[in-house]
Image: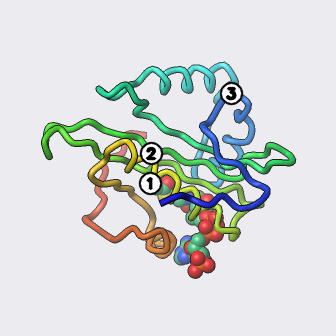
Amino acid sequence: MTTIIPDGFTVRRIDSRDFDGAKVALAGLTTVGEISQEDFNSILGYWDSVLLPNGKQAYNTFVITAKETEKVAAIGTVFVEKKIIHNGGLVGHIEDIAVNSDFRGQKLGKVLINYLSSIGKQLGCYKIILDCDEKNVGFYEKCDYNKAGIEMQIRYQ
Ligand SMILES: CC(=O)SCCNC(=O)CCNC(=O)[C@H](O)C(C)(C)COP(=O)(O)OP(=O)(O)OC[C@H]1O[C@@H](n2cnc3c(N)ncnc32)[C@H](O)[C@@H]1OP(=O)(O)O
């Protein structure tokens, strides 16, 4: 299924120009911390270096930007994991989804999830999973995700 990008917006892989915009959007999700432009570039370089056996990138972080201003309206990742189970299958993990608060309620979150899901599907994932707060379950259901399992964690920081 092709994702329709709303007028006035572009979707593309994250790059070094997105340093400020990515931090602002992600601050609406959690603590970003002290990340310099150099740190940011180094993380993007690391992500580019992690390849699946088929040569495709495992880290797939995309931004939706406003065409006029190049401002980052939304950001999110689908990380693809190679497994032993399911015949050495691939599982996609949707991570760190955030829509800049100035752009919420315009369907950009849904567009981004649809886009990332289609990337995961194209890469061959047999499923795509994510963890979220109870308050966002309705949003993900609107994106065709269903509740499955229970998230558990042990935190060190
Ligand atoms: C795996 C993870 O990263 S989970 C973390 C998710 N991110 C965050 O919580 C960060 C802060 N929040 C945000 O960035 C945004 O509010 C998001 C990503 C949750 C939603 O993005 P938006 O662009 O505002 O949502 P969007 O406009 O695409 O909404 C799509 C549909 O979901 C609905 N919706 C949006 N948020 C919610 C919600 N929290 N609960 C229920 N429904 C919701 C909308 O009403 C809309 O419904 P419709 O299609 O019937 O009109």
Residue labelled 1 has its Cβ within 8 Å of some atom of ligand 1: no
- Distance (Cα) linking label 3 and label 1: 24 Å
Residue labelled 3 has its Cβ within 8 Å of some atom of ligand 1: no
The location of residue 135, given as percent across then percent down, is 49, 72
- Residues at badges 3 and 2 in contact (C-beta under 8 Å)? no
Write the residue at 62% across / 36% down. Answer: 14
The mark nearer the N terminus, 3 or 2, is 3
The mark nearer the N terminus, 2 or 1, is 2
The image shows residue 6, relative to residue 137, as above or below, that is: above
Assign a secondary structure to mark 1.
Answer: helix
Q: Tell me how the rendering is colored.
A: rainbow
Given the image, on which type of amino acid does mark 3 rest? Ser
Given the image, on which type of amino acid does mark 1 rest? Ser
- Distance (Cα) linking label 3 and label 2: 18 Å
Location of mark 3 (residue): 16
Does residue 107 appear to the left or right of 95 in the view shown?
right
The image shows residue 19, relative to residue 155, as above or below, that is: above
